Amino acid sequence: MKLTEPLNVIYQSAEDGLADTVKPRLEMAGADCERIAVIDESIKSLSMIDERLEEAVIRTKAKLLILDPIQAYLGGGMDMNRANEARDMTKKLAALAEKYQCAIVLVGHMNKAAGNKAAYRGMGSIDFFAVARSVLLVGRVEGEENIRAVVQIKNNLAAFGHPKAFALSEDGFKRIGDYEITADEVLGGIAPKANKMEQAKRLLRELAETNNAMQSNEIFSLADEQGISKRTLENAKKELGVRAKRINNTWYWELDKI
Protein backbone atom coordinates (compact mmCIF):
# COMPACT_ATOMS: atom_id res chain seq x y z
CA MET A 1 0.00 0.00 0.00
CA LYS A 2 1.40 3.39 -1.00
CA LEU A 3 1.63 6.06 1.69
CA THR A 4 -0.10 8.53 -0.63
CA GLU A 5 -3.10 6.26 -1.16
CA PRO A 6 -6.36 7.67 0.32
CA LEU A 7 -7.42 5.88 3.50
CA ASN A 8 -10.59 5.66 5.56
CA VAL A 9 -10.64 7.32 8.98
CA ILE A 10 -12.84 7.13 12.08
CA TYR A 11 -12.74 10.42 13.97
CA GLN A 12 -14.48 10.75 17.33
CA SER A 13 -14.49 14.20 18.90
CA ALA A 14 -16.29 14.86 22.16
CA GLU A 15 -15.39 18.54 22.38
CA ASP A 16 -16.41 20.03 19.03
CA GLY A 17 -19.68 19.89 17.13
CA LEU A 18 -19.50 17.77 13.98
CA ALA A 19 -21.66 19.96 11.77
CA ASP A 20 -20.57 23.44 12.89
CA THR A 21 -16.90 22.86 13.73
CA VAL A 22 -15.33 19.53 12.77
CA LYS A 23 -16.67 19.18 9.21
CA PRO A 24 -15.96 22.82 8.20
CA ARG A 25 -12.39 22.44 9.46
CA LEU A 26 -11.91 19.20 7.55
CA GLU A 27 -13.30 20.73 4.36
CA MET A 28 -11.07 23.77 4.75
CA ALA A 29 -8.08 21.43 5.03
CA GLY A 30 -9.09 19.70 1.80
CA ALA A 31 -10.25 16.44 3.41
CA ASP A 32 -12.46 13.98 1.55
CA CYS A 33 -15.29 13.76 4.10
CA GLU A 34 -16.70 10.70 2.32
CA ARG A 35 -13.74 8.78 3.79
CA ILE A 36 -14.31 10.00 7.36
CA ALA A 37 -16.71 8.07 9.58
CA VAL A 38 -18.17 8.89 12.98
CA ILE A 39 -19.69 6.42 15.44
CA ASP A 40 -23.13 7.54 16.60
CA GLU A 41 -23.07 8.43 20.31
CA SER A 42 -26.54 9.98 20.49
CA ILE A 43 -27.98 7.05 22.45
CA LYS A 44 -24.90 5.67 24.21
CA SER A 45 -21.53 7.29 24.85
CA LEU A 46 -18.48 5.56 23.40
CA SER A 47 -15.54 4.24 25.41
CA MET A 48 -12.13 2.81 24.50
CA ILE A 49 -13.33 -0.74 25.23
CA ASP A 50 -16.65 -0.37 23.43
CA GLU A 51 -17.30 -3.19 20.95
CA ARG A 52 -18.56 -0.57 18.49
CA LEU A 53 -14.96 0.47 17.83
CA GLU A 54 -14.08 -2.91 16.34
CA GLU A 55 -17.38 -3.09 14.48
CA ALA A 56 -16.74 0.33 12.91
CA VAL A 57 -13.17 -0.57 11.92
CA ILE A 58 -14.42 -3.75 10.23
CA ARG A 59 -17.31 -1.97 8.49
CA THR A 60 -15.34 1.02 7.21
CA LYS A 61 -11.97 -0.74 6.74
CA ALA A 62 -10.49 2.28 8.49
CA LYS A 63 -6.72 2.55 8.79
CA LEU A 64 -6.79 5.40 11.29
CA LEU A 65 -8.91 5.78 14.43
CA ILE A 66 -8.79 9.04 16.40
CA LEU A 67 -10.25 9.54 19.89
CA ASP A 68 -10.26 13.18 20.97
CA PRO A 69 -9.73 13.65 23.86
CA ILE A 70 -8.65 10.62 25.92
CA GLN A 71 -10.68 11.71 28.94
CA ALA A 72 -13.98 11.55 27.08
CA TYR A 73 -13.60 7.88 26.10
CA LEU A 74 -12.65 6.26 29.40
CA GLY A 75 -16.12 5.05 30.37
CA GLY A 76 -17.98 6.02 33.50
CA GLY A 77 -16.30 3.70 35.99
CA MET A 78 -12.68 4.02 34.92
CA ASP A 79 -10.14 6.08 36.87
CA MET A 80 -7.46 7.25 34.43
CA ASN A 81 -5.10 7.98 37.32
CA ARG A 82 -4.94 4.28 38.28
CA ALA A 83 -2.20 2.56 36.26
CA ASN A 84 -3.79 -0.91 36.33
CA GLU A 85 -7.08 0.38 34.91
CA ALA A 86 -5.37 2.45 32.24
CA ARG A 87 -3.18 -0.52 31.28
CA ASP A 88 -6.17 -2.83 30.74
CA MET A 89 -7.80 -0.30 28.48
CA THR A 90 -4.69 0.47 26.41
CA LYS A 91 -3.97 -3.25 25.95
CA LYS A 92 -7.35 -3.70 24.29
CA LEU A 93 -6.71 -0.75 22.00
CA ALA A 94 -3.28 -2.13 21.08
CA ALA A 95 -4.82 -5.50 20.23
CA LEU A 96 -7.42 -3.79 18.03
CA ALA A 97 -4.71 -1.82 16.21
CA GLU A 98 -2.60 -4.92 15.58
CA LYS A 99 -5.49 -7.13 14.51
CA TYR A 100 -6.74 -4.75 11.82
CA GLN A 101 -3.52 -2.87 11.04
CA CYS A 102 -5.27 0.33 12.06
CA ALA A 103 -3.30 3.18 13.60
CA ILE A 104 -4.93 4.55 16.75
CA VAL A 105 -4.35 8.14 17.83
CA LEU A 106 -5.32 9.27 21.32
CA VAL A 107 -5.44 13.03 21.77
CA GLY A 108 -4.62 14.25 25.27
CA HIS A 109 -4.26 17.64 26.86
CA MET A 110 -1.30 18.79 28.93
CA ASN A 111 -1.78 19.86 32.53
CA LYS A 112 -0.37 23.06 34.03
CA ALA A 113 2.52 21.45 35.95
CA ALA A 114 5.23 23.74 34.63
CA GLY A 115 8.74 22.36 34.80
CA ASN A 116 7.78 18.68 34.53
CA LYS A 117 8.87 16.46 31.67
CA ALA A 118 6.37 16.10 28.84
CA ALA A 119 5.56 12.49 29.81
CA TYR A 120 4.30 13.69 33.19
CA ARG A 121 2.35 16.68 31.87
CA GLY A 122 -0.35 14.55 30.25
CA MET A 123 -3.64 14.14 32.08
CA GLY A 124 -3.87 10.86 34.01
CA SER A 125 -1.78 7.72 34.26
CA ILE A 126 1.72 7.58 32.77
CA ASP A 127 0.57 4.28 31.23
CA PHE A 128 -1.07 6.15 28.37
CA PHE A 129 2.38 7.50 27.51
CA ALA A 130 4.11 4.17 28.18
CA VAL A 131 1.91 2.04 25.92
CA ALA A 132 2.16 4.35 22.91
CA ARG A 133 4.71 3.51 20.23
CA SER A 134 5.02 7.17 19.25
CA VAL A 135 4.10 10.35 21.13
CA LEU A 136 3.86 13.75 19.46
CA LEU A 137 3.67 17.06 21.27
CA VAL A 138 1.69 19.77 19.48
CA GLY A 139 1.69 23.34 20.68
CA ARG A 140 1.82 27.00 19.80
CA VAL A 141 5.07 28.65 18.81
CA GLU A 142 5.65 31.58 21.12
CA GLY A 143 5.63 34.86 19.22
CA GLU A 144 3.99 33.30 16.14
CA GLU A 145 0.22 33.66 16.40
CA ASN A 146 -0.73 31.19 13.67
CA ILE A 147 2.10 28.67 13.81
CA ARG A 148 1.94 25.34 15.64
CA ALA A 149 4.88 22.99 16.17
CA VAL A 150 4.88 19.18 16.23
CA VAL A 151 7.72 17.64 18.25
CA GLN A 152 8.23 13.91 18.75
CA ILE A 153 8.91 13.07 22.40
CA LYS A 154 8.78 9.28 22.13
CA ASN A 155 9.45 6.78 19.34
CA ASN A 156 9.80 3.04 19.89
CA LEU A 157 9.80 2.17 16.19
CA ALA A 158 12.54 4.29 14.63
CA ALA A 159 14.80 7.31 15.12
CA PHE A 160 13.13 10.48 16.36
CA GLY A 161 11.63 12.57 13.61
CA HIS A 162 12.64 16.18 13.04
CA PRO A 163 10.24 18.77 14.51
CA LYS A 164 7.70 20.09 12.02
CA ALA A 165 5.45 23.12 11.89
CA PHE A 166 2.18 24.12 10.29
CA ALA A 167 0.17 27.32 10.07
CA LEU A 168 -3.53 27.85 10.75
CA SER A 169 -5.24 30.87 9.27
CA GLU A 170 -8.49 31.94 7.62
CA ASP A 171 -7.19 30.26 4.47
CA GLY A 172 -6.92 26.92 6.29
CA PHE A 173 -4.02 24.58 6.95
CA LYS A 174 -0.54 25.19 5.50
CA ARG A 175 2.37 22.80 5.98
CA ILE A 176 5.63 24.60 6.83
CA GLY A 177 7.90 21.58 7.21
CA ASP A 178 11.09 21.25 9.27
CA TYR A 179 11.22 23.67 12.17
CA GLU A 180 13.93 24.25 14.75
CA ILE A 181 12.20 24.05 18.11
CA THR A 182 12.44 21.83 21.18
CA ALA A 183 9.80 20.22 23.37
CA ASP A 184 10.92 22.43 26.27
CA GLU A 185 10.36 25.53 24.15
CA VAL A 186 6.86 24.37 23.21
CA LEU A 187 5.94 23.41 26.78
CA GLY A 188 7.46 26.48 28.36
CA GLY A 189 6.05 29.01 25.92
CA ILE A 190 9.60 30.08 25.02
CA ALA A 191 10.28 31.68 21.67
CA PRO A 192 12.49 29.30 19.66
CA LYS A 193 15.86 30.24 18.31
CA ALA A 194 15.89 31.57 14.78
CA ASN A 195 14.21 29.14 12.41
CA LYS A 196 17.16 27.24 10.96
CA MET A 197 15.40 26.66 7.64
CA GLU A 198 14.99 30.40 7.08
CA GLN A 199 18.54 30.92 8.28
CA ALA A 200 19.78 28.36 5.75
CA LYS A 201 17.87 30.03 2.92
CA ARG A 202 19.28 33.39 3.93
CA LEU A 203 22.82 31.97 3.87
CA LEU A 204 22.36 30.61 0.34
CA ARG A 205 20.87 33.89 -0.88
CA GLU A 206 23.79 35.83 0.60
CA LEU A 207 26.31 33.50 -1.03
CA ALA A 208 24.49 33.86 -4.35
CA GLU A 209 25.09 37.61 -4.30
CA THR A 210 28.82 37.09 -4.84
CA ASN A 211 29.09 33.57 -6.24
CA ASN A 212 27.58 31.90 -9.27
CA ALA A 213 28.63 28.51 -7.88
CA MET A 214 30.45 27.17 -4.83
CA GLN A 215 31.83 23.84 -3.71
CA SER A 216 29.21 22.06 -1.63
CA ASN A 217 31.77 21.25 1.09
CA GLU A 218 32.50 24.96 1.54
CA ILE A 219 28.79 25.71 1.89
CA PHE A 220 28.33 22.89 4.41
CA SER A 221 31.24 24.26 6.41
CA LEU A 222 29.80 27.79 6.48
CA ALA A 223 26.41 26.42 7.50
CA ASP A 224 27.94 24.35 10.30
CA GLU A 225 29.56 27.49 11.71
CA GLN A 226 26.05 28.97 12.03
CA GLY A 227 24.63 25.83 13.66
CA ILE A 228 22.71 24.79 10.54
CA SER A 229 22.56 21.03 10.03
CA LYS A 230 23.38 19.36 6.72
CA ARG A 231 19.81 18.09 6.49
CA THR A 232 18.33 21.56 6.97
CA LEU A 233 20.72 23.02 4.38
CA GLU A 234 19.77 20.30 1.87
CA ASN A 235 16.08 21.09 2.43
CA ALA A 236 16.73 24.81 1.90
CA LYS A 237 18.64 23.98 -1.29
CA LYS A 238 15.67 21.98 -2.55
CA GLU A 239 13.12 24.68 -1.73
CA LEU A 240 15.22 27.35 -3.48
CA GLY A 241 15.68 25.16 -6.55
CA VAL A 242 19.48 25.08 -6.30
CA ARG A 243 21.07 22.53 -8.64
CA ALA A 244 24.24 20.56 -7.98
CA LYS A 245 26.80 19.62 -10.62
CA ARG A 246 29.99 17.58 -10.52
CA ILE A 247 33.20 18.99 -11.95
CA ASN A 248 36.44 16.96 -11.76
CA ASN A 249 35.08 14.77 -8.95
CA THR A 250 34.04 17.83 -6.92
CA TRP A 251 30.41 18.79 -6.31
CA TYR A 252 29.33 22.41 -6.79
CA TRP A 253 26.05 24.14 -6.04
CA GLU A 254 24.82 26.51 -8.74
CA LEU A 255 23.67 29.64 -6.95
CA ASP A 256 23.05 31.94 -9.92
CA LYS A 257 19.40 30.86 -10.27
CA ILE A 258 18.31 31.85 -6.73
Image (tube, rainbow, N blue to C red):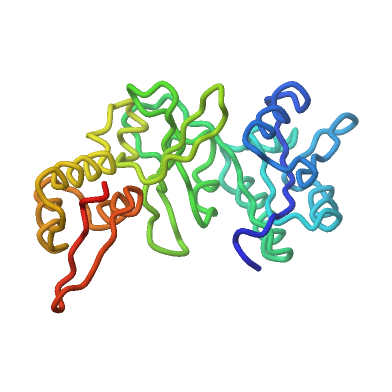
| x and y percentages locating residue 61 in the rendered image | 79, 58
Quarter of the image holding residue 103?
bottom right
| 170 up-or-down from 185: above or below | above
| x and y percentages locating residue 21 in the rendered image | 70, 24
Residue drawn 48% across and 40% down? 175
| 191 up-or-down from 55: above or below | above
Q: Nearer the viewer, residue 244 or 189?
A: 244
| x and y percentages locating residue 140 in the rendered image | 42, 28
Q: Is residue 76 left or right of residue 129?
A: right
Residue drawn 46% across and 36% down? 166
Residue drawn 31% across and 30% down? 115
Q: Is residue 17 left or right of residue 217?
A: right
Task: Classify the position of the N terminus by image quarter.
Answer: bottom right
| x and y percentages locating residue 107 in the rendered image | 58, 39
Q: Is residue 4 left or right of residue 36?
A: left
Question: Total marks drawn?
Answer: 0
Q: Nearer the viewer, residue 130 or 188?
A: 188
| 11 up-or-down from 88: above or below | above
Q: Is residue 113 left or right of residue 95?
A: left
Quarter of the image holding residue 38?
top right
Residue drawn 70% across and 56% down? 63
Q: Residue furthest bottom?
A: 249
